[in-house]
Amino acid sequence: MISSEQTVKDIAVSHPLATRVFQRHSINFCCGGGVALSAACEAKGLDAKRIVEEVEAEIAATEDNAARWEKEPLERLIDHILTTYHEPLKSELPRLQRMADKVLAVHGDKMPEVLGELQRVFTSLRVELEGHMAKEEQILFPMIRAGRGSDAGAPISVMEHEHASAGAALERIRELTDDFQTPEGACTTWTALWAGLAELEKELHIHIHLENHILFPRASEA
């Protein structure tokens, strides 16, 4: 049974399919997932009871083949994060950067404040994520693989801080893109940029959730 008094992150950990519902309603389950679902719904003007029912319906209607990462070996979870999130980001971030630069250069006069700030926020996010992944791959993940997760409090704290920063950047990007609603008359590149940023938000939320709420706590206790 799911209760609206459970925290959003705990529901997401125990029921991975719940993240689909949370994403549909823009309920933050990664950096802001430490609040009760009822509080998260109230903040967005949502009916918590209906959200619980939607989560339960999602679970009932779908054959749940989602891996239960809170039960899998830490090494397998790290491998999953690397192959599913890190590797795609290494090519996706430069692709989005090229589009953001192009849209600003070609259409900057149409929405100068929006497109200029969007390009700056995304560029900062890209630089931060690339450095963040390098630190995880070179320092934190090897420590966890070596069974030294309990000694990794300092690097984990740094990673969590950077996750919060990335989450704030994603929120600002959503604001600047008007919830990823493509402006009327937008060209193909502009449309593709908005779609790519929406997908980036979706994937990063799950990525951060897996690290903040499953990998890091389990590694610290190992």
Image (cartoon, rainbow, N blue to C red):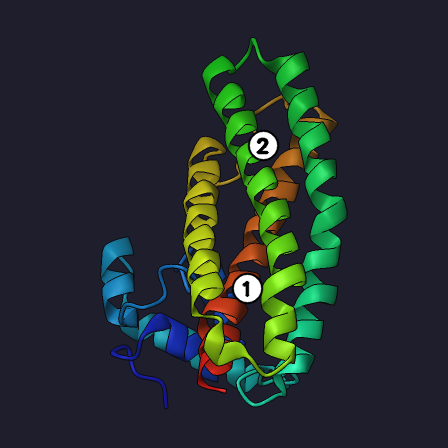
Residue under label 2: 123
Residue located 43% across and 47% down the image = 165
Classify 56 as above or below 85.
below
Residue 82 seen from this side? yes
Image quarter where the N terminus lies is bottom left
Disc 1 residue type? Ile
Residue under label 1: 206
User: Looking at the rendering, which quadrant does residue 147 occupy?
Assistant: bottom right
Disc 2 residue type? Thr
Where does residue 55 sit, x and y in percent of width and height?
44, 76
User: Front-most of 84 and 142?
Assistant: 142
Say left or right for 2 vs 74.
left
Callout 2: few (<14), some (14-19), or many (20+) C-alpha neighbours within 10 Å?
Answer: some
User: Looking at the rendering, which quadrant does residue 104 occupy?
Assistant: top right
User: Front-most of 103 and 86?
Assistant: 86
Q: Residue furthest top?
A: 109
Asked if disc 1 and disc 2 are in contact, CB closer than 8 Å, the reply is no
Residue located 56% across and 56% down the image = 204
Q: For residue 139, which numbered disc appears in the image?
A: none
Residue 57 seen from this side? no
Where does residue 93 sit, x and y in percent of width and height?
68, 42
Discs 1/2, front: 2
Work out whether mark 1 precedes mark 2 in sequence or the reverse, and give the earlier one: 2
Q: What is the secondary structure assignment of the residue under circle 1?
A: helix
Residue located 41% across and 52% down the image = 164
Where does residue 2 sit, x and y in percent of width and height?
36, 85
Where does residue 6 sit, x and y in percent of width and height?
30, 79
